[in-house]
Image: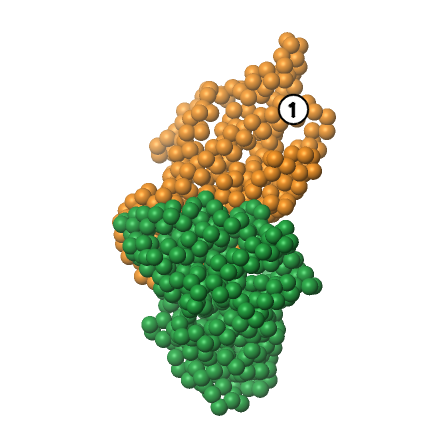
Chain colours: A green, B orange
Amino acid sequence: MFKRRTAVIVAATLTLALAGCGTNLQSQGSGTDKPIVYWGTWAANTPQAKLFTSIINDYEKKTGQHIDVQWVGSGATDKLKNAIATGTGPDFYDTSINGAPEMAASKALGDVSTIFDTQIPNEKKTIREVLPASVLKGISSDKGPQFVPYSIFSIGLWYDSATQPDFDTTPPATFDDFLDVAKNVKSSTGKQPIALDGGISPYNGYWFYQLLLSTAGPGELEKMATSPAAWDDPAVRDAAEAVGRLVKTNLFEKDYMATKFPAGQNGWAAGDQTFIANGTWLASETQPVRSATQKPKVIVMPPVHAGATVTPMLGALGWAVNPDSKVQKQVGQFIAFALQKKYNDRIATDTQNIPSRSDSPAPKELLEIQKSLDGASKVALDFDGTGWLAPQWFNNVFVPLDDQMIGGKLTADQFLAQGKQKTAALLGK
Amino acid sequence: MPQAEMPARVADHGNGGALDRARRRVYLPMLLPALILYVVLYVAPAIAGMLISFTTWSGLGAEATWVGFQNYVDLFRDPVFLAALGNTLALTLIVGVALFIIVSASMIVLRSTKGRAFIRSAVFVPAIISPIAIGVSVSFMFNPKGLVNGALGAVGMGALQRPWLGPDYILSIIVLGVIWSAAGFYAVLLMSAVDSIPESLFEAARLEGASLFQQFRHITLPLTRDMFSTAAVLWVIAGIKTFEIILAVTGQAGIPPIQARTLAIEQYLRVTTGESGGIPQLGSATAIGVVMTAITVILIILSRRIARRTNLEL
């Protein structure tokens, strides 16, 4: 009798517990609609996660719609792909220009074209109308926009405005002019003027790629990945030779190819070096270790040839939609709410990054880059997108050769000759 | 055992005995759960892995395309894969030899040293620390402005300062880190075998005038050969899949340089294509896994053949 009673209690407890689990997973919302599930790729204590949590709280209070947010953190891409493929994914999630092709290949990227036409609350404009044309172009594939950007970023030449005030008014007209300034800094201070974390290959690659954008424009690196003949292009040679002059002039910090990240950028932030080529995220990354006297600013890399247009590199972070989501309309309404100017402005003030809206000002350190992106007729993707269009070439041909050139192991001539030969070997498989 | 009982026992084990028939009846039901688990958790994934290695596939949601042996052909034509293969074999061999020397020295010195229990525990500590932590510590020590270059400068040996984490030295630094991480485990493993050797053998050898090295060569080594063989197998398995410590030394924010890539790192890059946001190449990555398994099996067979001798019994 006792045993039977115990069994009944255990069974009832298990049933209630399982029922509780079901409730927890399926109907947490207090609003009238089904809750919207959002997976963010930020860690929970980051400024971005805090900002979005505050926006979500405002939205829930305003509409009664519940948003179930999970901060997935690192490794989110695999978790997202697996969850969406097995029907347990979120309704929307964070992604980027670099991450979108991988999600699209896994059929995890929903169509957001109608979301772009959603009107932003309290403003008589749609999402499409508040974003710069260059950003809309950059985040679109041949099938249209891939996600809705909330923040954009770029690459450029960082300097300390406190010690280089001339850069604010008259930035160097050419790359060689910049090298002259750096040489003067070296001779006057006795310090190596340029910082570089040489262990981070993309940071090494920024030098060549930014210079290539000024000699050949966007798309040239992609040509180099797909055609050995592109390595013979004089514009490619001009960029490689400019890198050669940079290395030969011996301006980088000592042992720059052997630093443990983030030793290089922290050295720059502490004032040990004056210049560094890096992303627009650098100011927020180095804020905790920055010298009190430093006034960091970033400009697009000066061109190899005077007067040439330098195409800015565009990166973007934003919200993508699960193609299987049953609440896509509600997702669109939330995204429009979150893209109100008062919230998008806070991408600059709260996270020190560039907001996606053209009327939301960037932090003062990044204003020049924002101007160049907003006014650009063309933008370049990160390394022309070769990281996802030709990953084997990018990882195994371009990166090792570029690392060797920036490390002084290869001359510009050897870089070009080996690049052509190795690209031909890879494509000839 | 009385001789008269033998035929009955033989009959039980042979054909047709009642006990034998009963055993046969329960044999399959008893074996089945373990067999099902083994097939589901090991055999099926292994077969699936083999099949995936004959395809190009970018993961769940994408179509897999059958390409036969093309992934394997591509691997052995790819200079980057061949470099990773060379690095893996070099790392496994160099660290293996270093471990053998360190462990042998420990067996000579620690066997009779005062406070050996404490020393043994102390050398074991790195084995319980995460390889990531070891790798990060090593990279901070060998940073250009780190402990090693600082110490060399402080003692007037500045000429020996090097950019240790640069491409020219990075594999050597990783090898050092792996040795630091693994030596304690193998020393403790082998010392447990030494403890089972009767002290009287060493006493007799000492009376005969044998040095510590001679005692090691003629007593310790022959009587711990089986454990050496086991340790060699364990190291081959661990060495071929060396992974975390490399990411920690080279930094997760970048793609490890080719000079520092092992097969496991190369496999990881093909699954994730590093930080560049590329499409995963799961067929190629799985083919690397199959190659790693094959190399591990070959090295295990080789190491066991080298260590194979007639067992000595005390």
Percent from the top left, x then y, of residue A391?
38, 56
| Residue B264 in view of the camera | no
User: From this viewpoint, which residue is outermost toward the right?
Assistant: B114
User: From this viewpoint, which residue is outermost toward the top?
Assistant: B208
**Residue at 54% from the left image edge and 30% from the top image edge:** B98
Crowdedness near tag 1: few (<14), some (14–19) or many (≥20) residues, C-alpha within 10 Å: some
Residue at which label 1 appears: B109
**Residue at 44% from the left image edge and 29% from the top image edge:** B303
Total numbered badges shown on the rendered structure: 1
* Nearer to me, B168 or A74: B168
Q: Is residue A71 left or right of residue B66?
A: right
Task: Indicate whether A136 appears above or below B162.
Answer: below
Q: Quadrant of the N terminus of chain A?
A: bottom right
* Nearer to me, B56 or A294: A294
Picture quadrant of residue B56 = bottom left
Percent from the top left, x then y, of residue A85?
40, 66
Q: Is residue A308 left or right of residue A142?
A: right
Picture quadrant of residue A184 = bottom right
- Identify the element where label 1 is drawn: helix
Which subunit holds the residue at mark 1? B
Task: Indicate whether A389 appears above or below B127.
Answer: below
**Residue at 51% from the left image edge and 29% from the top image edge:** B97
Amino acid at dot 1: Val
Task: Indicate whether A330 appears above or below B6.
Answer: below
**Residue at 50% from the left image edge and 40% from the top image edge:** B168
| Residue A171 in view of the camera | yes
* Nearer to me, A74 or A128: A128
Percent from the top left, x then y, of residue A37?
50, 74
Percent from the top left, x then y, of residue B40?
40, 51
Task: Indicate whether B20 appears above or below A103.
Answer: above
